[in-house]
Image (tube, rainbow, N blue to C red):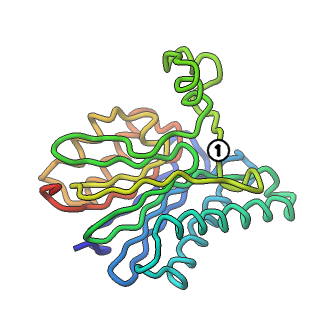
Amino acid sequence: MISMNNCFGITDKGICRTNNQDSFAIEEKDGCLLGVVCDGIGGGRAGDVASAMACDIMTEQFRQFFDPAQDWQQWLLDTVNLVNISVYQKGLEDDECAGMGTTLVGFIADDEKTVVINVGDSRCYHLTGGQMIQVSEDHTLVNELVKSQGFDYDFACSLVGRNVISRAIGVNEVVVGDCFELDKYQYLLLCSDGLHGYVEEKNISDCLYDPGMSLDEKGQKLVEMANEAGGWDNITAVILRGDEDGE
């Protein structure tokens, strides 16, 4: 059964940052669960406001307007569009928030299916049968160069930098999220690049599959590993436990 008891979220500012621009949300309604992770961008220009706004609006829209009988993918696309417009307008109206934006990765899940949406480079991973697979696709200049030009990842990073985002919430008046539908899995992980950018996927996978740790302990361990790797960025993770057999 999908419930709040099957889901855990955690965020940490890391070692090197003075504030936390990441946000996350978990909400339950009518047998469905919403999970969201946002990583604010814009440095001192209110990235924390953008990420918090995005999570708050997603949660409020889910509480008030989500109906399990409707098209989940369309609901997510429409709601992310509303989030984008709201963050964009806030940036126009408030000088302290000018230029702010945020990544967003989220899911809606029940016992039968899961639909994922992402904008930016916060990621969703699907874990089943000992494997860890990235579901979302990074919206970064590096990834675009790798896809369009066939460049090696490290070479592409040397040209444009690893973290230059090509799509984000609130930066432009219109944004389109990518949606993915999943069936069964043992774990689903949403995380900001403060985790996936510094901790090897094998170590993340080993942590999530560890039968000796509770869901809370797994989340705390992920943060600990990111901080041990330098804690260079804010760290956020939402873990959803699905079918233990992934079947």
Say above or below: 85 vs 179.
below
Name the residue located 35 percent from the left edge and 45 percent from the top edge. Answer: 224
Residue at disc 1, secondary structure? loop
Residue 225 image-quadrant placement = top left
Q: Position of residue 235 (x, y in %)?
A: 47, 48
Q: Residue at x 53, y 67 (%)?
A: 74
Dot 1, how many residues are within 10 Å of its Cα: few (below 14), some (14-19), or many (20+)?
many
Where the C terminus falls, by quadrant?
Answer: bottom left
Q: Nearer the viewer, residue 7 or 88?
A: 88
Q: Using the image, determine if residue 123 lies above or below residue 75.
A: above
Q: Which is nearer the eye, 220 or 205?
A: 205
Q: For the N terminus, give its image quadrant.
A: bottom left
**Residue assigned mark 1:** 167
User: Residue 47 or 33: which is nearer the viewer?
Assistant: 33
Give left or right: position of 68 versus 207.
right
> Residue 46: x and y, percent?
72, 55
- Snapshot quadrant of residue 242: bottom left
Badge 1 amino acid: Arg
Location of residue 55 in the rendering, given as x and y in whole percent from the top left corner: 56, 66
The count of marks equals: 1
Left or right: where 11 falls relative to 112: right
Question: Does residue 149 lie above or below 60 as drawn?
Answer: above
Can you give x and y, in whole percent of width and height, for residue 165 in the image? 63, 38
